[in-house]
Image (spheres, helix red, strand yellow):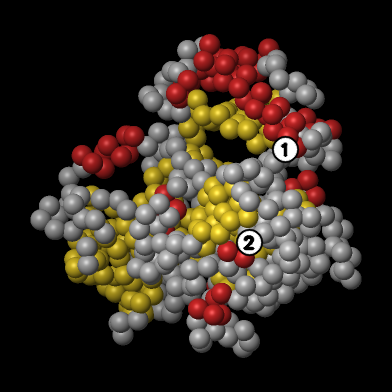
Amino acid sequence: MKKLIFTSALSLSLLFSISQTQSIDFRVYKPQTQGAHSLQNILQSLVGDGVVLKNYSVSKAWSDEAFGYFEDGKARLGMKKGLLMTTGGITGLCGKNTKPDMSNYTHRTADPNYRTTGNQPVFSSPDLESYIGKNQKTFDAVVIEMDIVPTADSLSFNYVFGSEEYDEFVGSSYNDVFAFFISGKGVEGQVNLAVVPNTKDPVTVNSINNGGTTSYNARPSNPTYYVSNIDGNLGIEYDGMTKLMEIKKAVTPYETYHLKLAIADVGDNAFDSGVLIEGHSIVSYEKSYSVLYSKNETSIDEPYKNLLNALVKEYQTKTNSNISITGHTDNEGEIDFNKELSCKRANEVKAYLMAKGIPENRLVVDCKGETQPAYDNRTDLGKHMNRRVEIKLLGNDAKYVSDKKNETITAQEKSSLINNSPNPFQGQTMINASILTNVKDARIVISDLQGKQIKEIYLLERGNTSVSFDSGNISNGIYLASLVCDGAACGAIKMVLEK
């Protein structure tokens, strides 16, 4: 079966045709070169308050079925739209789970040289193989890398993991897993952020489930965070999904961080898995507060009013920052009732903050109901902690954007590559560039001295900018970084990799 690893890389140079497939309210769109569902716009739509997307990179070219954009009008997974990445094909996901073992071999179809046996499987992910260990091989990997700049000291975003490996292969070696790696200031090496809440355990088929149904005889593991889809009520093909999960990480404001999103099959290329990342959920924030509630209550207890008063004082020191207010419940009661209850709680907090002078247009309300538990609903304490409204004082990228517009570009007469540091380097290096403001399309192409392309990185920032280049599994040697601006060469530098 497969294991899942999720890495995504996007290429605007590929001529993707747009395609919409729908299942009642669940729709998917294959990426296109331009328009609302271009790869750049899909990634940009993930970024919310306080985060700047600097660039993104493409490691390989896959079938245009491997990733795309999704919409769910009913928000059954707790989110309405975002990025979908799979080890198979996205259009096959639209349906009420009509197949118990869906395997869309879109990667194999896209590459006539695709191999499923041997020591060098096509579309493997060295990062994921190193992470899961035990000499396990990966297949059908999709990798997206991007550099972001948070403008506050905490980073978060939301995702859901689903798989056809549920429930038959729970407890087996076909333990589908994915990773959201981060590297940058304050992070030692490369760290996976996709872990089971309140643990360091990676999110996998074996770590979140309701037990196995076959000879593996696996017992349930963290079932609070698992949703069975055997009856197809989620409007998507996967047999099982996680609840909506939140990633949180302390960061240093205004520093560049490298994100690597990776997913792949493990062991073989059968049975698809995927990750859905919520749109506009990649945010940075300075302060986070939680208001807790008794069962079915919506009123704010006095101690939490004092906490909200402290938030108001903190807000008054900020300029044009937004505040997110997200309501949650435990899992007791009907789904629709809990959704309404979470909205009542969130709107009560909104009304309180407005009464204290915070403008309504600075308050962003969301209602998750029971879709995003932060604690184990099998215990009374866990249920109490899940009956909450989370409030975040969001970062503001206005100053960063303004400074970029006003900065003096190093090479006024033309765009250019400046250098890479360190050089020679091991593992990762920063490539520094200067891009004129009138350049529409800028990219850095990494190639070896024989001209073989290794990676293509699309630059979204203008002015002085930097790009993180992760050498991955390429060998020692000299590599060429070439800057291309609106189709014309703008210079090159040599980089020396020493492992």
In percent of the image, x 70 and y 16: which residue is there? Answer: 299
Disc sitting over residue 370 in the figure: 1
| Residue at the image point whose x is 32% and y is 53% from the top | 460
Q: Which mark is residue 328?
A: none
| Residue pictured at 85% horizontal, 62% vertical | 212
Q: Secondary structure at mark 2?
A: helix
User: Reading the chain from its start, which is encountered first: label 1 or label 2?
Assistant: 2
Q: Quadrant for residue 130, please give it.
A: bottom right
Quarter of the image with the C terminus is: bottom left
Q: Within 10 angstroms of label 2, few (less than 14), some, or many (20 or more) residues? A: many
Look at the numbered disc 1 and give the secondary structure of its residue. loop
Q: Position of residue 322 (x, y in %)?
A: 46, 28
Q: Crowding near pointer 1: few (<14 within 10 Å), some, many (20+)? A: many
Which dot, 1 or 2, sits closer to the camera? 2
Is residue 23 or residue 58 the one in the foreground? 23
- Single out the residue that lies furthest toward the front: 24
Res 426 seen here: no
Identify the residue at image location x=14%, y=58%. 414
Give the answer, above or below, for where 22 lies relative to 66: above
Q: Quadrant of the N terminus?
A: bottom right
Percent position (x, y) of residue 495?
A: 31, 71
CA gap between label 1 and label 2 equals 23 Å
Q: Are marks 1 and 2 in contact (CB under 8 Å)?
A: no
Percent x, y of residue 276: 59, 54
The residue singled out by tag 2 in the image is 93
Q: For the residue marked with disc 1, what is the amino acid?
A: Glu
Q: In the rendered image, is residue 50 in sight?
A: yes
Q: Nearer the viewer, residue 241 or 323?
A: 241
- Which amino acid type corresponds to the residue marked 2 in the rendered image? Leu
Residue 346 relative to residue 44: left or right: right
**For residue 280, side relative to residue 173 (left or right):** left
